[in-house]
Image: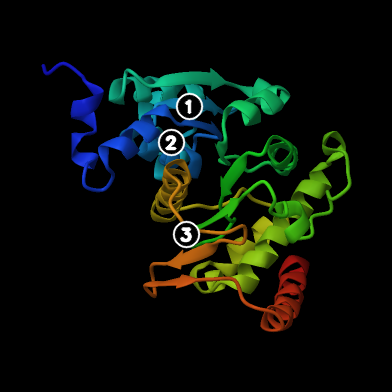
Amino acid sequence: MNAFTYAEMTTRNLGFVTPEEQEKLRAAHVFIPGVGGMGGACFLTLLRAGVGNFTIADIDTFEISNLNRQVFAFTDTAGRSKAEVAAEAAARINPEAKLKVLGAEWLDQIEALATAHPIIVNGTDDAQAGVRMYRVAREKRATVIDAYAATLPSVYVVRPDDPRPEERMGYPTVGKDWQSISDDDRQACLMKELEWALTHSSTHKYVDLGIAAELAAGKRKRFSFAPMVITTGNLMAYEAIRLILGHAGGADHRGYFFNPHAARVEKPLAWPLSALKGALVRQFMAKMTAS
């Protein structure tokens, strides 16, 4: 068996990145709360790209239903901590990577984490945790990479001076203490995010509307699909690498959707078209939830 060296592991990266850029990746620090779906896919890609320092966190264990999309889910990892399983896989890929593993306590440590990690990849789907994380990221000047609840792969990048998602999408959490965010608030946040995605992309064309109505009514868990989740994770990884290397371009705080069905990128609509479509979307969603 060949002995591991970082240089040999990353030798085929050269050409996509320079030797100097590879060292920047090796020195980079990234925090990923949530390493199940898109967060896990992003973590795997960044790890293989040679990023050398991570903190990962997850409060969940793998379930059989995760096998359809989560890159660290296998039949023999069902019932095990997602963060611990991801860390074990990381050690088999790059044993030199420095990795800290957290559970639910990550939210109590978010100020220190946002200080130590200039890049955060949001792999969580909890509005309360997300609101807290984004507010602290602004204070600590960290950039957050995120994606929408949609049937199309997507990505957006929230830099320190950008509006927070709760502000931009009109969540009921604005001005509210994060610890008082209720289950009703969480559902309302999801509805606002769905409204934004339906307004600014063609995601409605690629979803079973009956199942979507059940989701909107809080009657079922989010549905997901491996090509969408893993592609989203890789879009997030591209943005993280761009930030680490200081390359221009990429997604802004509103981001974009990648439509593989039509082979195009869908960017947010400009006003007043977004206002007109948004009104129609709200009418549609009201009928959908009523049914």
Determine contact: label 1, label 2, CB under 8 Å: yes
Residue type at mark 3: give it: Gly
- Quarter occupied by residue 253: bottom right
Question: Mark 2 or mark 3: which comes first in sequence?
Answer: 2
Q: Which residue is mark 3?
A: 249
Residue most toward the left?
A: 1
SS of the residue under disc 1: strand
Residue 254 screen position, x and y as percent: 61, 61
As displayed, is residue 129 above or below residue 211? above
- First of labels 1, 2 by sequence position: 2
Residue 137 left/right relative to 226: right
Hey, which quadrant is residue 20 in on the image? top left
Which of disc 3 and disc 1 is earlier in sequence? 1
Observer-side mark, 1 or 2, equals 1
How far separated are the C-alphas under marks 1 and 2?
Answer: 9 Å
Residue found 18% across the figure and 27% down from its top: 8
Q: Is residue 31 visible?
A: yes
Q: Are marks 2 and 3 in contact (CB under 8 Å)?
A: no
Disc 3 on helix, strand or loop? loop
Dot 1 corresponds to which residue?
Answer: 54
Residue farthest to the front, as pictured: 20
Which residue position holds label 2?
43
x, y percent for residue 78: 45, 27
Query: Closer to us: mark 1 or mark 3?
Result: 3
Instruction: Give the x, y percent position of residue 181.
Output: 83, 41
**Quadrant assignment for the N terminus:** top left
Residue at (68, 78) in percent of width and height: 274
Q: CA distance from mark 2 to mark 3?
A: 22 Å
Task: Tell which of 47 and 12 is nearer to you.
Answer: 12
Task: Tell me the kind of residue under disc 1.
Answer: Phe
